[in-house]
Amino acid sequence: MSQLPDGTALTVLVAGGSGASGIAVARALAAAGHRVATVGSDATRIKAAAGEAGDGVTPFTCDLAEMAGVRRLRDDVGDALGTVDAVIHLVGGWRGATGIADQSDDDWEFLERSAITTLRNVSRVFFDDIAASTHGRFAMVSSTSLDKPTAAVASYVAAKAAAEAWTMAMADGFRKASKDGGGQAAAVVLAVKALVDDGLRRKHPERSFPGATDVADLAAAVVRLLGTPAAELNGARLRLAD
Ligand SMILES: NC(=O)c1ccc[n+]([C@@H]2O[C@H](COP(=O)([O-])OP(=O)(O)OC[C@H]3O[C@@H](n4cnc5c(N)ncnc54)[C@H](OP(=O)(O)O)[C@@H]3O)[C@@H](O)[C@H]2O)c1
């Protein structure tokens, strides 16, 4: 049963689907009737994640930081499930230090690769497909720590700010494509303070996770994005934290 009022089932790529957030998002999208491609860099982990997400979720293995691989991924997903309408970008990671002076090059390299390069690659390869779709969407998950950056997370907030800026530039690209006779696409930032899931709660029964967003709530927000008119969403930064 499709979640969209007009009965459309979309092809949605979950980029970075191997973790709890990816499993929840893929599961909710498939339950809403969409065709879901979930991608991770490790074959065993992404197959297990797709299995946990359930029927309607197809795993693909690709290092999204490598452009040639992302181009092959577009062909593979297109052959298996059809042209991609929407990309939900979940690759990010986290690195912190004690202040500015000890922000390390290694951490910056990691964050640049995971939070920025994967997003740039995926958006460059899938932009035209999303822009041409009647329900095109690109969403990334960012952090409320950008609202008030602290010294300890300088590299992390800088990388996330770059990814957010890129996503807002995509929104401009979608606006222009729509004016030029393209589809109805939107680029959106979803900002959370932290993500939590049942596994994390079980692992840390002593913690209360204040302000954290459950991955099920993130997933529900992602499903809603597909059914909300693009004009209401394009360029929005939606806060999912308390
Ligand atoms: N967790 C939080 O508390 C929190 C807080 C604020 C914002 N966020 C943001 O929310 C999003 C989801 O966070 P998360 O913690 O659930 O996910 P994550 O651990 O940052 O990444 C999700 C998955 O991406 C895969 N991945 C990593 N590098 C990849 C690559 N080069 N190519 C393909 N896949 C790759 C990893 O699986 P493999 O290693 O198996 O590929 C990983 O399980 C991220 O953008 C994160 O920055 C999270």
Image: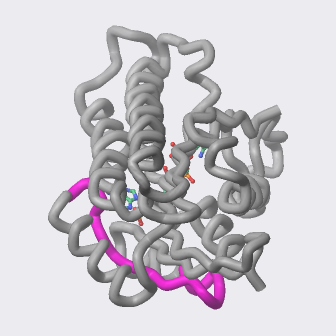
Q: Where residue 100 appears, x then y in whole percent?
A: 38, 10
Q: Quadrant of the C terminus?
A: top right
The way the protein has been coloured in the rendering is one colour
Residue depicted at x 63% and y 81%: 52
Q: Where residue 37 appears, x then y in whole percent?
A: 48, 77
Quarter-of-image position of residue 179: top left
**Number of numbered discs present?**
0
User: Does the segment drawn in magenta span residue 56?
Assistant: yes
Residue depicted at x 40% and y 23%: 158
Residue lying at the far left in this picture: please name it: 68
Residue depicted at x 66% and y 61%: 226
Q: Where residue 43 appears, x then y in whole percent?
A: 36, 79
Quarter-of-image position of residue 67: bottom left
Q: Which residues are magenta?
A: 50-66
Q: Where residue 5 appears, x then y in whole percent?
A: 78, 70
Q: Is 20 placed left or right of 74 in the picture?
A: right
User: Does the segment drawn in magenta span residue 22?
Assistant: no
Quarter-of-image position of residue 225: bottom right
Q: Quadrant of the N terminus?
A: bottom right
In the image shown, does 13 or 195 lie closer to the viewer? 13
Q: Is 26 placed left or right of 220 in the picture?
A: left
Q: Is residue 167 something one can see in this rendering?
A: yes
Against 237, is 126 above or below? Answer: below
Q: Is residue 95 something one can see in this rendering?
A: no
Against 240, is 50 above or below? Answer: below
Against 142, is 71 above or below? Answer: below
Against 220, is 164 above or below? Answer: above
Residue depicted at x 30% and y 72%: 74
In the image shown, does 182 or 160 lie closer to the viewer? 182
Q: Is 132 placed left or right of 54 in the picture?
A: left
